[in-house]
């Protein structure tokens, strides 16, 4: 297996776009996905976009042959959504949509890729969870549950795949400036962050590059919190 092929879900914007740029700069071939790849263009021959809706089993079935051809050595489960609401007002649909995308989508994409990694006896799986799954956040019971679920998924999968040289880790970002956090980052929040600023996509990308590299060979089953110190145990 070529060790420098990364599949990044949700590569069209925000953290995923930052991950694509960072892995390209580091010499990786990048397969990036979003729901409608016809909206995306790439001038770099090492970056290709494919359509994939991770919440839709039919879309995943269609994507299988793309994964089989590309044979990723690194998978970054980054695609995710929020549908915030106070608990008593939260609809079944808001709950199910978020769990289906963030948690079940991660499970299904990982299944496609893990089979290839098992055959190759090498791989890196990186799940982008959230500090909302660790510290909780009012209005985000659905999102927190999905992200805490991703961290649990990470630990159990790490135990299953470790013997085949496949590491599985989560990166748990705090508040990173992207479309998802538009209107959420204000002075009051910044005051609570010991490093005194919101995160940038590059803050997440550098940790993902490290976890994908041989330097992180002996790290698995971990959740790395990248939040400027907002949450401390
Ligand atoms: N920003 C933060 O502060 C923060 C903090 C903690 C964790 N996170 C996590 O980091 C990840 C990226 O967040 P972001 O801030 O970069 O969000 P974003 O700017 O809203 O981007 C979300 C990405 O996910 C893709 N996506 C959404 N639903 C999808 C689906 N059903 N199938 C395939 N792709 C889908 C979007 O692609 P299209 O819309 O183009 O399809 C887009 O590329 C998410 O998992 C998020 O929960 C973010």
Image: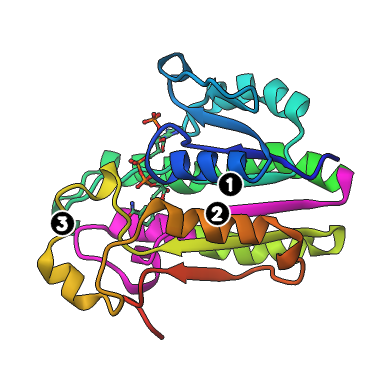
Which of the two marks, 2 or 3, is nearer to us in this view? Answer: 2
Left or right: 74, with 47 as reference point: right
Q: Residue 104: which numbered mark, if any?
A: none
Q: Secondary structure at mark 2?
A: strand
Closest to the observer: 173 or 60? 173
Residue drawn 42% across the image and 46% down it: 15
Sequence-first tag of 1 and 3: 1
The magenta stretch is 120-149
Sequence-first tag of 2 and 3: 3
Q: Is residue 176 on the magenta stretch?
A: no
Residue 157 is at least partly visible in this image: no
Q: Classify the position of ligand 1 by quadrant: top left, top right, bottom left or bottom right.
A: top left
Q: Are marks 1 and 2 in contact (CB under 8 Å)?
A: yes
**Colour basis:** rainbow
Left or right: 83, with 79 as reference point: left
Quadrant in the picture for residue 219: bottom right
Residue 203 picture location, percent across and down: 44, 59
Q: Are marks 2 and 3 in contact (CB under 8 Å)?
A: no
Which of the two marks, 1 or 3, is nearer to us in this view? Answer: 1
Residue 190 is at least partly visible in this image: yes
126 up-or-down from 180: above or below: below
Q: Secondary structure at mark 1?
A: strand
Closest to the observer: 80 or 30? 30
Left or right: 190, with 210 as reference point: left
Residue under numbered circle 2 = 127
Outermost residue, top side: 38
Q: Residue 76: which numbered mark, if any?
A: 1
Residue drawn 66% across the image and 64% down it: 156
Q: Quadrant of the C terminus?
A: bottom left
The verdict on label 2 being within 8 Å of ligand 1 is no
**Residues under labels 1 and 2: Cα distance?**
6 Å
Q: Residue 86: which numbered mark, if any?
A: 3
């Amino acid at each position: 297996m070529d060790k420098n092929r990364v599949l990044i879900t949700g590569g069209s914007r925000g953290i995923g776009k930052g991950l694509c740029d960072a892995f390209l700069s580091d010499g990786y071939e990048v397969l990036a996905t979003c729901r409608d790849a016809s909206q995306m263009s790439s001038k770099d021959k090492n970056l290709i976009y494919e359509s994939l809706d991770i919440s839709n089993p039919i879309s995943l079935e269609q994507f299988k042959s793309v994964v089989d051809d590309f044979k990723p050595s690194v998978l970054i489960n980054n695609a995710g959504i929020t549908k915030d609401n106070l608990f008593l007002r939260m609809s079944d649909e808001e709950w199910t949509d978020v769990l289906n995308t963030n948690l079940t989508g991660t499970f299904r994409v990982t299944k496609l890729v893990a089979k290839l990694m098992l055959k190759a006896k090498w791989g890196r799986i990186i799940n982008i969870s959230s500090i909302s799954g660790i510290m909780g956040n009012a209005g985000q019971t659905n999102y927190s549950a999905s992200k805490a679920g991703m961290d649990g998924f990470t630990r159990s999968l790490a135990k299953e795949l470790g013997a085949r040289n496949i590491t599985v880790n989560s990166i748990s970002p705090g508040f990173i400036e992207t479309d998802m956090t538009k209107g959420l980052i204000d002075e009051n929040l910044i005051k609570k962050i010991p490093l005194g600023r919101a995160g940038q996509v590059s803050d997440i990308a550098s940790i993902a590059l490290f976890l994908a590299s041989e330097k992180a060979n002996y790290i698995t089953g971990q959740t790395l919190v990248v939040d400027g110190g907002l949450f401390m145990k």
